[in-house]
Image: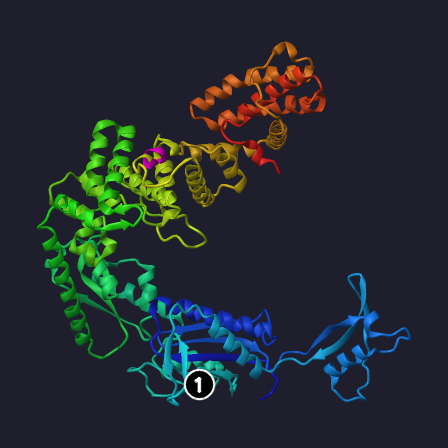
């Protein structure tokens, strides 16, 4: 094998991989292999990488990989000069022993040229040498071993090797290893396999049983032409999308958009073939959410929707084979789906025989949390919170509706349909409520109280739903904080971050005029003495919610400084947060903003150092200096205008009114000694600064805008 730089291909052939982790495994394999080769000097930073991942393999093609890494110069510190050389400058026994350990044990080993250099404050002896670059055989073996250890495998399999004695651990049994550098095989081994140039194609569609790869660059082409395998995950995914669009266009319908389903199907097939199937239209009497979930979750089919978003009786199958006559494949899939839909219809018909009201009592037998009681106890708390919020936001009528919806909100957990498909909780509650003859406001609130279920999800569609959704999330947040179940790191088993974001989104986007403090207090009271939720826990929960909200607001394009300025006020009413942020953004663009923010920060620092309380009363007779008189006068002129704008919610105008303070504030600090020895004058000047700070920070703490 020559030392030329050539392209490298590594493939590991395995039994069918877990579809939901296939893409991640393939990408990790390619990234880890490349990083390891780079670290050993066998690949540079300008290389091109192609990752491959199919149900039975992952592989990587890396361009311009060297047969041997370049040699490197190395400088090894031996010991301090005082230890290595005697008074005559001759090598000490300690130095000689060290050199012989490096260069050989022979007594006649000549002393190499050593370098003297400062190592900190001590002069030391250094040995400069050339380290020979690692060969591709050595480096690739090390890279393979490292890579397999780094793969994100959640559950290992233990299986026996061909010798019948040895066993190894891996995600699935491995059956083949390819390592080609150009046309040359690199003799590496892993998982009991020795590398070669042979691989396998599709189990049923391949033209040949064994594919002999010509070189690293022909891998993808040969797998496609000889093996009936599209090895690239993104190429295979695009091919599935192309076929889905083509077949659905023939029907005049649109497949359900689901990126996760598309990824999973891509990980299940090597040679995709999209086919159209049908089911009995009579099944459309079942709620379409049930049918769609059955098709997607159980069968990996793509349901087809009409122009109005309603489910049709047609669906698309992504098959892994391409027979000349596809009728048997379609018929088999239709037969399997018919059984699934029949089960769903049975569940639906059985569930409708009992009302939601009749199921509520059964929640007393379902444990919610060992420290927080049963689902029945939880529903009682949600009911109380929802009623209190409803009373506050809409009076007795809204309170009654919110209470009724809250009482029924978890009843569908005891239905057969939700037992089979937990993802349908709330959705089935809405259908059963409508079947029971309940008003749409109540039915929709039962479904919507789980919303928003994820980032970007829609909010509850009516006020009843908003009250119950807030109650549900607040009950969870307060309860979990009250028993110390606070998320740490990435762990969040009760989805408290999502609940906090849901609360802030509803308060902000629906502009609900109720304070965060009030709804947290309402929620904590319903727990009575079951949890420990005092001022410390309330403060902690407020911070948790503010942190989630800050991250959410950054996604809206506000800067960290602007968000921090508003959050520093610990706003309790979140319905005007966006107006405050817009005002702060507009204020930041004013030429006076920088100077006023800096002055505000200076005022804050002065007031922080004051022992005791600062009076809010200014004695005009004690304003001796012209600069403090001028500041007081301008403040008196500005305050009525700014206060009026603030009360009307015109926050931008309120902040813009402060622009005239720039000159008198700057003049004040240039000419007035605040911390004078005269305690009376000092107290009066501090009162003036406190008034200034109060006026400037009514919308936001603008000192946070100081650079």
Q: Is residue 595 above or below residue 265?
A: above
Count neighbours of disc 1 (C-alpha within 10 A) and say few if under 14, some if 14 to 19, many if 20 or more: some
Count of picture labels: 1
| Quarter of image, res 318 | bottom left
Q: Is residue 52 above or below residue 499?
A: below
Indicate yes or no whether the magenta region holds residue 323: no
Please state which of residues 132 and 589 is positioned toward the viewer in this rendering: 132
Q: Residue furthest top?
A: 621
Q: Position of residue 300 (x, y in %)?
A: 26, 65
Q: Is residue 11 left or right of residue 590?
A: left
Q: Is residue 633 left or right of residue 441?
A: right
Residue at (57% x, 36% y) in the render = 705
Q: Is residue 574 above or below residue 303?
A: above
Q: Residue furthest right?
A: 88
Numbered range of the magenta stretch: 520-524
Q: Position of residue 325 (x, y in %)?
A: 19, 78
Q: Is residue 679 above or below residue 231?
A: above
Q: Residue furthest left?
A: 353
Q: Quadrant of the C terminus?
A: top right
Residue at (60% x, 35% y) in the render = 706
Q: Main secondary structure of the magenta part?
A: helix
Q: Position of residue 194 (x, y in %)?
A: 46, 87
> SS of the residue at dot 1?
strand
Report the residue marked by disc 1. Answer: 193
- Residue 234 in sight from this viewpoint: no
């Amino acid at each position: 094998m020559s030392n030329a730089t050539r392209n490298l291909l590594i493939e590991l052939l395995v039994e069918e991989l877990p579809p939901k982790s296939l893409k991640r495994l393939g990408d990790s394999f390619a990234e880890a292999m490349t990083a390891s080769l780079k670290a050993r000097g066998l690949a540079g930073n300008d290389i091109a990488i192609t990752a491959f991942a199919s149900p039975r393999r992952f592989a990587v093609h890396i361009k311009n990989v060297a047969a041997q890494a370049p040699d490197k110069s190395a400088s090894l510190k031996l010991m301090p000069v005082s230890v290595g050389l005697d008074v005559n400058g001759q090598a000490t026994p300690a130095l000689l022993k060290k050199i012989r350990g490096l260069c050989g044990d022979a007594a006649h080993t000549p002393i190499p040229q050593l370098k003297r250099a400062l190592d900190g404050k001590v002069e030391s002896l250094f040995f400069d040498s050339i380290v020979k670059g690692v060969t591709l055989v050595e480096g690739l073996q090390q890279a393979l071993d490292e890579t397999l250890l780094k793969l994100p495998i959640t559950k290992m399999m233990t299986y026996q090797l061909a010798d019948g004695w040895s066993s190894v651990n891996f995600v699935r049994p491995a059956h083949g290893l390819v390592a080609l550098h150009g046309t040359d095989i690199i003799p590496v081994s892993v998982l009991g396999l020795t590398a070669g140039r042979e691989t396998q194609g599709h189990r049923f569609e391949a033209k040949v049983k064994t594919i002999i790869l010509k070189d690293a660059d022909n891998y993808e082409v040969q797998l496609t032409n000889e093996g009936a395998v599209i090895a690239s995950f993104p190429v295979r995914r695009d091919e599935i999308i192309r076929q889905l669009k083509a077949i659905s266009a023939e029907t005049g319908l649109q497949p359900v958009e689901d990126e996760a389903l598309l990824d999973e199907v891509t990980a299940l097939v090597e040679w995709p073939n999209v086919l159209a199937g049908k089911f009995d239209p009579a099944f459309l009497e079942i709620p379409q959410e049930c049918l769609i979930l059955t098709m997607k979750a159980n069968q990996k089919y793509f349901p087809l929707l009409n122009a109005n978003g309603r489910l049709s009786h047609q669906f698309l199958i992504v098959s892994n084979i391409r027979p000349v006559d596809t009728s048997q494949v379609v018929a088999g899939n239709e037969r399997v789906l018919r059984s699934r839909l029949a089960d769903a219809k049975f569940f639906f018909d059985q569930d409708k025989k009992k009302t939601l009201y009749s199921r509520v009592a059964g929640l007393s037998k379902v444990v919610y949390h060992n420290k927080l009681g049963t689902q029945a106890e939880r529903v009682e708390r949600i009911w109380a919170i929802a009623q209190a919020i409803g009373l506050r936001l809409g009076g007795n009528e809204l309170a009654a509706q919110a209470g009724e919806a809250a009482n029924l909100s978890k009843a569908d957990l005891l239905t057969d349909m939700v037992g089979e498909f937990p993802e349908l909780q709330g959705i089935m509650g809405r259908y059963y409520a409508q079947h029971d003859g309940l008003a749409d406001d109540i039915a929709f609130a039962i479904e919507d109280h789980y919303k928003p279920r994820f980032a970007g999800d829609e909010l509850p569609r009516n006020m009843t739903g908003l009250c119950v959704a807030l109650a549900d999330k607040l009950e969870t947040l307060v309860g979990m904080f009250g028993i110390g179940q606070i998320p740490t790191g990435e762990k969040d088993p009760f989805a408290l971050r999502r609940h906090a974001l849901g609360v802030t989104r509803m308060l902000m986007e629906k502009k609900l005029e109720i304070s965060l403090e009030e709804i947290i207090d309402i929620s904590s009271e319903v727990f009575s003495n079951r949890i420990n939720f005092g001022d410390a826990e309330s403060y902690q929960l407020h911070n948790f919610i503010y942190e989630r909200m800050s991250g959410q607001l950054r996604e809206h394009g506000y800067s960290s400084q602007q968000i921090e300025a508003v959050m520093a006020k610990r706003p309790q009413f979140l319905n005007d947060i966006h107006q405050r942020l817009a005002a702060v953004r507009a204020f930041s663009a004013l030429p006076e903003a920088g100077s006023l923010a800096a002055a505000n920060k200076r005022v804050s620092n002065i007031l922080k150092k004051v022992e005791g309380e600062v009076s809010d009363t200014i004695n005009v007779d004690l304003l001796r200096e012209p600069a403090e008189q001028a500041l007081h006068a301008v403040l008196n002129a500005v305050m009525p205008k700014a206060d009026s704008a603030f009360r009307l919610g015109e926050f931008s105008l309120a902040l813009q009114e402060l622009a005239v303070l720039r000159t008198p504030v700057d003049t004040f600090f240039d000419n007035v000694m605040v911390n004078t020895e005269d305690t009376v004058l000092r107290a009066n000047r501090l009162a003036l600064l406190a008034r200034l700070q109060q006026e400037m920070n009514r919308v936001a703490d603008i000192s946070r805008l100081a650079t």
